[in-house]
Image (cartoon, rainbow, N blue to C red):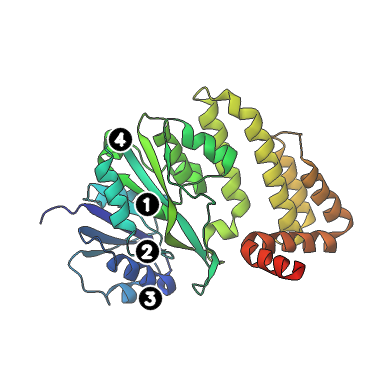
Amino acid sequence: MENPKVSIIIPTYNRANYLEQAINSVLAQTFQDYELVVLDNASTDNTSEVVRKFRDERFQYIKNEINIGPINNFNKGLKVARGDFVIIFHDDDIMAPELVEEEVKILNENEDVVLVASNVELIDEKGKTIQNKLLSIDQDIIFEKYEYIVKRLKNDILLPCPSVMLRKNFLDVNNLIFESEKGPAADTYLWFKINLSDKLLYLVSRPLLKYRIHSGQDSFRNDYYVWLSHFRISHDIIANNNLYHLVPELKIRASNFLVKILFVQYLFNRIDKDNLKNALYNLRKEKFWSDKLTLDTKILILLSQNFPKLAKNLVLLRRIVRKYPAFLKRIFRKEME
């Protein structure tokens, strides 16, 4: 059987409730020259029953005998992929029908592009839209050497992992994989390493994927440690590649961001006072730590310690403003008329 153009890999573990939607979104793609491989990391739910409903010659189901960890399962996906291009897709997300077609077109027409990703729409557990566009960009972005690293640190521009299509040969030739020791930031670290080369990264401004936010995500449960890992690898990669001009800015941004996360977790009873103190103590020992806390961080600390109810309400208000900016603008305009 001739190799497919694209390998779509879905690593999964105990996500039977979302997996069927993810698979259906792949099977609904307008581009048809692909293989779909579901890598079951020793699930204990009814994942196998869900998967066996599907009858498609492009579809393969592999179940690991033991759980090898999410990052190792990602890398297993890279090994079994037979296509020229590969996507490591999430088992709880939903592809737009044209995602594969559009990303293949970009890679086919641009030999120097080795990674293409897209903006995403955020949805909740029930599939309801939370945010139409995660990234506030109106034009596609092409990143040359170091540019993605800079924009990720300075502008919060990211490449959402389940939307990323990679040129498989480039990974193989350069021995690039997801590094498990980088923890939750393994995907970010891989994108950074790719951006150290002279090849290009491409970001489509239009959302081509629905990214689900729910309590079962590792990033939801461990958001502090996800970001801690991200800033650690960010510091290492910019320090090891002579990007020293970014270090001071990274330190200020990382310190303030992580302090805010800790105090918000404290306000919403996700950590207690002792855990907060220990985390802050350990954070100050990080190589990216900075004592230059911004005014809004200092205000959050002050309110959390003296007026916790007010601090909590302000955090909730800020979340509402971020989630529903267009709706709030319409209300404001109506009130002013």
Question: Which quadrant holds residue 1?
Answer: bottom left
Earlier-in-chain disc, 1 versus 3: 3
Q: Residue placed at 47% from the left, 37% from the top? A: 148
Q: Secondary structure at mark 1?
A: helix
Q: Which residue is mark 3?
A: 46
Please, what is the three-letter code of the amino acid marked with disc 1? Phe
Can you say whether 117 is above or below 244 in the image?
below
Where is residue 329 shown, x and y percent of the image? 67, 63
Q: Nearer the viewer, residue 153 or 233?
A: 153
Q: From mark 4 to mark 3, how far is it between C-alphas?
A: 42 Å
Residue extending farthest to the top is 242
Are there few (<14), some (14-19), or many (20+) residues within 10 Å of tag 2? some
Give left or right: position of 67 versus 259.
left
| Front of the two marks 1 and 3 | 1
Q: Which residue is mark 1?
A: 74
Earlier-in-chain disc, 4 versus 3: 3
Please, what is the three-letter code of the amino acid marked with disc 2? Ala
Q: Secondary structure at mark 4?
A: loop
| Front of the two marks 3 and 2 | 2
| Front of the two marks 4 and 1 | 4
Earlier-in-chain disc, 3 versus 2: 3
Give left or right: position of 263 versus 77.
right
Please, what is the three-letter code of the amino acid marked with disc 3? Asn
Are there few (<14), some (14-19), or many (20+) residues within 10 Å of tag 4? few
Give left or right: position of 174 versus 290.
left
Q: Residue placed at 32% from the left, 51% from the top? A: 103
